[in-house]
Structures are given as structure tokens and as C-alpha cells.
Amino acid sequence: METQFLNTFVTVVDRGSMAAAARLLHITPAAVAQQIRTLERELGVPLIARAGRTVSVTEEGARILQRARDLLRNVADLRSVANENDLAGELRLGACPTALAGLLPDILSRMVATFPQINVFIKPGYSADLYRAVEGGDVDAAMVMQAPFPLPKTCNWQLLREEPLVYWRRPVLPGATHTNCSASSH
């Protein structure tokens, strides 16, 4: 079985369409479809249900999805095992919108320069969803807002940066009828 075809399957499921997976994998949508069909033939079950331009994972595909992710991570880790002196493999990192826009770009650019053998996968999302993704093993770590609830013992919290919360409003002008800021487009 070709591990690249498993990677294509996981990417299609994650992206929700063959076209989006093709863009990420730098291959044509036809090549994505062919790889999925080949994998389905090898396994003897349908993995993807096609509905127009979108796809969904079948029951059979859902049963193998986590094992496919685990297998792909183990294959990526082989590079690290073979090169004991170099850190290598895959880092699956979740990030909330605040981290994606502010903190993460600088950190990633330094990390990639220091550890070029690490492949980074970014899963964008909101903090609550990313907590579940870490707990479920879908991502290795996440950059999120601090949880207002206790974390499970399997997780660890590390403060990266504190930012003030700022409220801004326009001053009320004499005779004005609106006191809040708003935007409109015409």
C-alpha cells in the first residue's frame, strides 16, 4: 500500500474536497481522485462519498482514519529515528485566530530555520475546539486562549504571552445621536 495514497485520503477528509486537497498536495484533482480510487480498490471498501464538489468520509473511511493518521505520523518519524542527531518528523499544531495572526508566524519562521526536517501542519480553530483536538490526539499541541476550566491531567499549560484586553469607543460629540462605533458598506 502506498503511504502517499493514505496521505491523500487524510488530506481529502481534512479539507472536505478533492480540489482543496489537490491544491495542498500540489497535484491535480484527477490525480487525487485516482489515488483515492486505487486505495479504495486495495482496501475493498469505499472511503469517500462524493456529492458534487464536496466529499464526506464513509463509515468504512471513518474507521480507518485515525489509524491512517497514526501510520503517516510513524512513517514521518522514521526520518527522525534514522537521523538521531536531527529533529525530524511531523508537528500537528492547532492555533486560534489570535495566534495565527500574531504569535505563530514569527515562531514558525524561526522554528523552520532551526529545524528544517520538521513538517508543520496547522489546524486553525477556536480554543474550545482545539482543546478537544489536543485531547483526542488530532493535534500535538495548540496555541489557544487560557481555558476557563481545569485541564485534564494528560495536558499541560504553558503561558506564551499575556495581552491586555482593550475597549475602544469614539467620544460622544455634542448633539450626536449614536454613541458606539459601527461600520457599514454601501
Image (cartoon, helix red, strand yellow):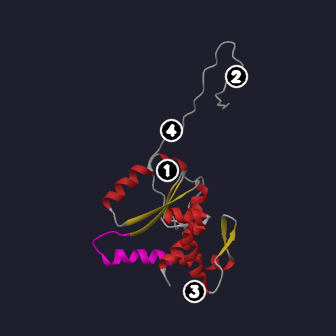
- Could you tell me the amino acid type at mark 3? Glu
Rendered residue at 54%/52% (across/down): 96
For the residues bearing labels 2 and 3, Cβ distance under 8 angstroms:
no
Above or below for 158 versus 79: above
Q: Mark 2 points at which residue?
A: 178
Choose top left, top right, bottom left or bottom right for residue 62.
Answer: bottom right
Give the residues drawn in magenta, as a range: 71-88
In the image, farthest residue toward the left: 85
Rendered residue at 57%/70% (across/down): 30
- Could you tell me the amino acid type at mark 1? Leu
Above or below for 97 versus 136: above
- Could you tell me the amino acid type at mark 2? His
Q: How many angstroms separate mark 4 from mark 2 (CA)?
A: 27 Å
Which of discs 1 and 4 lies nearer the camera? The answer is 1
**Disc 1 element:** helix
For the residues bearing labels 1 and 2, Cβ distance under 8 angstroms:
no
Residue 37 horizontal/vertical position (percent): 60, 79
For the residues bearing labels 3 and 1, Cβ distance under 8 angstroms:
no
Q: Name the residue under label 1.
A: 100
Residue 23 horizontal/vertical position (percent): 52, 62
In the picture, the disc for residue 164 is 4
Q: Mark 3 points at which residue?
A: 42
Mark 2 is surrounded, within 10 Å at the Cα level, by few (under 14), some (14 to 19) or many (20 or more) other residues, namely few
